[in-house]
Amino acid sequence: MNKAIDPALMQAAEATGSLGMDAYWMPFTANRAFKKAPRLLQRAEGMHYWDTSGRQVLDGVAGLWCVNAGHARTRITRAIQEQAAEMDFAPPFQMGHPKAFELAERVAALAPAGMNKVFFVNSGSEAVETALKMAIAYHRVRGDASRTRLIGRERGYHGVNFGGISVGGMVANRKHFGTLLGGVDHIRHTHDPARNAFSRGQPAHGAELADDLERLVALHDASTIAAVIVEPVAGSTGVLVPPQGYLQRLREICDKHGILLIFDEVITGFGRTGNPFGAQTFGVTPDMITCAKGLTNGAVPMGAVIARQHIHDAFMNGPEHLIEFFHGYTYSAHPLACAAGLATLATYAEDGLLTRARSMEGYFADAVHSLKGEPNVIDVRNFGLVAGIELAPLPGEPARRAFGVFLDCWQHGTMIRTTGDTIALSPPLIIERHHVDQLVDTVRAAIRRAA
Ligand code: PXG
Ligand code: PLP
């Protein structure tokens, strides 16, 4: 391999066996720019990736918010290998396999008390679709069939399928795709830099924004509303931490009106906030949790909906030989995913990773908040082991400055993520202090060069 001279393109040619990068239409990627200057990963272990030229890169985002135990954990790798050899696939409809039941028990044991029914899917997007359908069907099987309306939140991200983009609140993810689902509305987002910029942890102001749900109840009437879905901490839209008291208030309003509350914990699940789920960190129990990513440490695609007992039980009526919930995926509870999930949860338990964010949070917060005062840094937000650093956009060119920082960090051996003009950091939960230093120092230098 030619390591010295030739940059990205030559490496890509070697890595892909030719210059052929045409066929792959890449997701959520600037395809043309990427193919002119590819960034190709080849290997991963612990806190690091190595690219196709053998260069080591610090992983500042746990892959894509999912590799919470760090890369290439032997126990997980071995479990997947052994499962593939023993049984590759088992149909999930009218059939089962032991690991699916075991994993469901273990996930339920981690969830808030009373949330003990687990429905497996293959991604966060599928978890969201499943939860939304479950919510509407739940009301119907209870004889409350007028409750069909779904409420999301501005700036929410709930994956990319039609239900998820309909309740979601990211304009770019919605505007190209027609009329979306009907009967959807949105409450206001909680981002309020005028009052809350540079908050450490939960911002002080904005609990009253939950009252926006009362506005929608007044408009549509509670009898038409099935569920509200929010991320406890919004990730993809730039790390928006809920104001103190906000989630409690949302829970109270949902209870008052018989509306189901769904927490989308695809990012906040599995230790990101210092507990297995954000629900526990914030002390608010929803009716359903959607999760994915960290469930299998990113090693095999898998997601899940965790529901309260009474939601499940509402379906368990009618003749016992009939299917109760007409929903499921070919790859629900796939044996490789279940094996990966079991090994992942065992790894989290063994290494204390689901609470490790608590002990690292202070150091991490100090480090990211030290970026205050750097050029164009207009806000720093943090919670658990996730942080958002917001930059002032280049005039007339939103997202460009942050993307420049992303490229600069990559060139300097660190992988971060940007959304709009916000840099998002969400490292593997195994991160040590010297990694935090390296991560934040690299970001700082890149921000200075971008000034
Ligand atoms: N809900 C939430 C809250 C998410 O963060 C999904 C649903 C969808 O999960 P899948 O597995 O279908 O991708 C997510 C995923 C980003 C970024 O901008 C974040 C996600 C996905 C892609 C990019 O950092 N989160
Ligand atoms: N499309 C067709 C034609 C199918 O037969 C199926 C599943 O049987 C699907 C889509 C759904 O695929 P999945 O169950 O993997 O989501």
Image: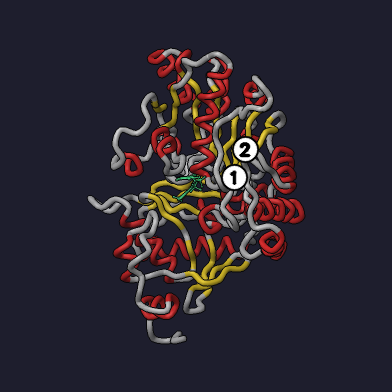
**Residue for point 51% across, 55% down:** 64
Identify the mark nearer the N-term, 1 or 2: 2
Q: Position of residue 162 (x, y in %)?
A: 40, 38
Q: Residue 445: in sight, yes or no?
A: yes
Q: Position of residue 280 (x, y in %)?
A: 66, 35
Please say if 318 is above or below 75.
above
Mark 2 belongs to which amino acid?
Phe
Which mark is drawn over residue 332?
A: 1
Tally of marks: 2
Q: Is mark 2 within 8 Å of ligand 2?
A: no
Using a 10 Å C-alpha cutoff, classify the residue at mark 1 as few (fewer than 14 neighbours), some (14 to 19) or many (20 or more): many
Residue 74 placement, left or right of 422: right
Q: Nearer the viewer, mark 1 or mark 2?
A: 1
451 lies above or below 38: above
Quadrant of the image occupied by residue 436: bottom right
Q: Which label is found at residue 119?
A: 2
* Screen quadrant of the C terminus: bottom left
| Residue in the picture at 31% in, 40% down | 177
Front-most of 430 and 201? 430
* Residue 193 visible in the shown view: no
**Label 2's element?**
strand
Residue 441 in the image, given as x and y percentages of width and height: 50, 64
Q: Residue furthest left?
A: 396
Estimate the spatial distance between the alpha carbons at disc 1 and disc 2, rounded to whole Å. 8 Å
Give the left or right position of residue 96, taking residue 175 as reference. right
Viewer-side residue, 153 vs 384: 153
Between residue 173 and residue 209, name the one nearer to us.
Answer: 173
Q: Amino acid at mark 1?
A: Ser
Q: Is mark 1 within 8 Å of ligand 2?
A: yes
